[in-house]
Amino acid sequence: MKSGNLVELLPRDNSWCAANEEEALCHLAALTSPVDRAAEAVTGLLKRFGRPADIIRAQKCELTKVTGVCEDMANTFNSVHTIFLGLLWQQLQNSNSAHCKFQISNWCREQLRSENSDAFLAVLYSHGDFCGTTPYTVGTKGSVKVYTREVLKYALRAYATSIVVVFSRKHGDSDMNDEEFRSIEELKCVSAHLGIEVSDVIVLAER
């Protein structure tokens, strides 16, 4: 419900549910500021960033440039993103299949969203159950080097039986280049000798 340019907050009780994302943002902001100031800050945030999803993903230094947004409020919004990442991680843990591209893609996009360079990581499964990820490696513009030994080191430690490799493409084409393709073929070959399958290759293109 709106009053002028501001969002009017409805009374909150045990059965309260936000009417929309804007009202939910106002309640988050009101945790650290007076209600009227929180509503004004959210109006400014929406004007600057456009969507609630972009607000909770923004850097704290960018959030605090908006009038009425204090450091505590920015921390609150950033914590929502942290929780969101945790929920995605839980979803990944519950995927029970090395072929769940949707869950893997979602988590990797969010994990790598602040990285400005192309990156690579591997998601590990043991007999269909998620068992971890490798640290991601950063490449140059349009290319990422795949370190086969490092990927397999983490895979063996996690008793992985299958690997999903993920390229996050921030520059250049959305396909693997020749060097990356050869690296993945090498990884597949070496992994097979260790009883580990490279079950999928996902390339996340910057939208």
Image (spheres, rainbow, N blue to C red):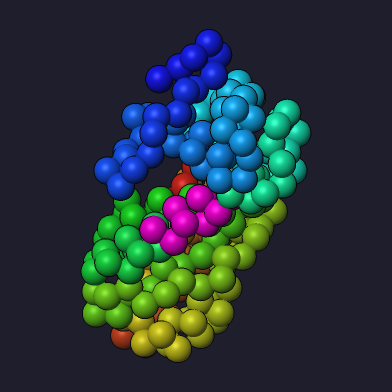
**Picture coordinates of residue 64 (x, y %)?**
73, 38
Majority secondary structure of magenta residues: helix
The front one of 89 and 32 is 32
Residue sitting at 55 percent across and 54 percent down? 79
Q: Does the magenta stretch include residue 79?
A: yes
Residue sitting at 44 percent across and 36 percent down? 24
**Picture coordinates of residue 29 (x, y %)?**
57, 39
Specify the quadrant that holds the N terminus.
top left
* Picture layout, residue 163 above or below residue 1: below
Q: Does 39 sit left or right of 133 as displayed?
A: right
Q: Is residue 166 visible?
A: yes
The front one of 173 and 22 is 22
Q: Can residue 116 be seen in this view?
A: no
Chain part drawn in magenta: 78-87
Q: To which quarter of the image does residue 59 belong?
A: top right
Q: Does 193 sit left or right of 110 as displayed?
A: left
Q: Does 145 sit left or right of 190 as displayed?
A: right
* Picture layout, residue 24 above or below residue 14: above
* Picture layout, residue 198 above or below residue 181: below
Q: Does the magenta stretch include residue 95?
A: no
